[in-house]
Amino acid sequence: MPADERRQLILDAARRAFSRRGDVGRTTIKDIAAEARISEGNIYRYFESKEELFYEAAVRPLQEAFELGEDRMQSLFDLPIADRHARVVAYYREMISMLTDLTPLLGLVLFGDPQYADPFYRQVLRPALTSQQERWREVYKGIAGRDDLPTRYDVFAHFGVALMFALEQRRSENPPPIDEVADELARQGYALIVRAEQGAARRSPRPRR
């Protein structure tokens, strides 16, 4: 087996083993080797420690996913307003799909060992949401000349809603279609733009007759 394929095999097995045990401390290299059906020595050829393996298997994919989400959001701002709805729908569809795939890792990292949970929240997840808020504000400022929307609550709420629909996709017996959910979330996003426009209109002086 080529080295890159064997490395990926180990990472996939590590995710399953860590998820089954629920934390890093109770998961051993022996557990991961058994899951991958290879020797422990083979694992040490690719990873120096269990901690490095956990980071590469669980933390790095989440970090890369949030960075990708930020890139997708930035691409929205390069489009004319009239063309954004379809791109926003695509963004939410991809976000929900991404979270659906990564929910087990997100739970494992955020609710597992504080050694990994605290740095991930403070250095990856929270900054990603802050960056998203700043990029959204660039759009609203260009439209309405104000930079106080969206608020932190708006951004947290949208992420929370996307996460809940990701859980629906994984756990519900009859999950709603992702396209339908993405379209509705996109419409709610435009509601923020309307708020910004209305606020700008109220503050603008009326022309004298």
Image (spheres, rainbow, N blue to C red):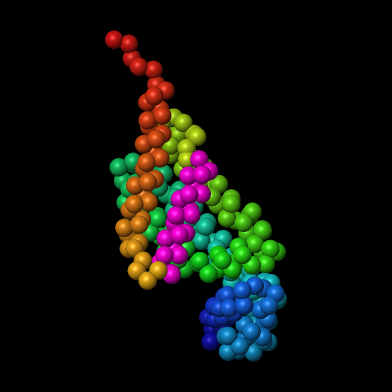
User: In the image, 206: left or right of 128?
Assistant: left
Can residue 205 be seen from the camera position used here?
yes
Count of labels in the image = 0
The quarter of the image holding the C terminus is: top left
Residue 133 included in the magenta stretch of the image? no
> x, y (%) of residue 73?
44, 50
Q: Residue furthest top?
A: 209
Can residue 87 be seen from the camera position used here?
no
> x, y (%) of residue 140?
43, 37
For image coordinates 47% across by 63% down, the residue present is: 99
User: In the image, 136: left or right of 90?
Assistant: right
- In the rendered image, the vertical position of residue 177 relative to residue 77, given as above or below: below
> x, y (%) of residue 132?
50, 47
Residue closer to the observer: 74 or 146: 146
For image coordinates 33% across by 41% down, the residue present is: 81
User: In the image, 41: left or right of 175?
Assistant: right
Q: Which residues are magenta?
A: 151-171
> x, y (%) of residue 93?
38, 59
Residue 155 included in the magenta stretch of the image? yes
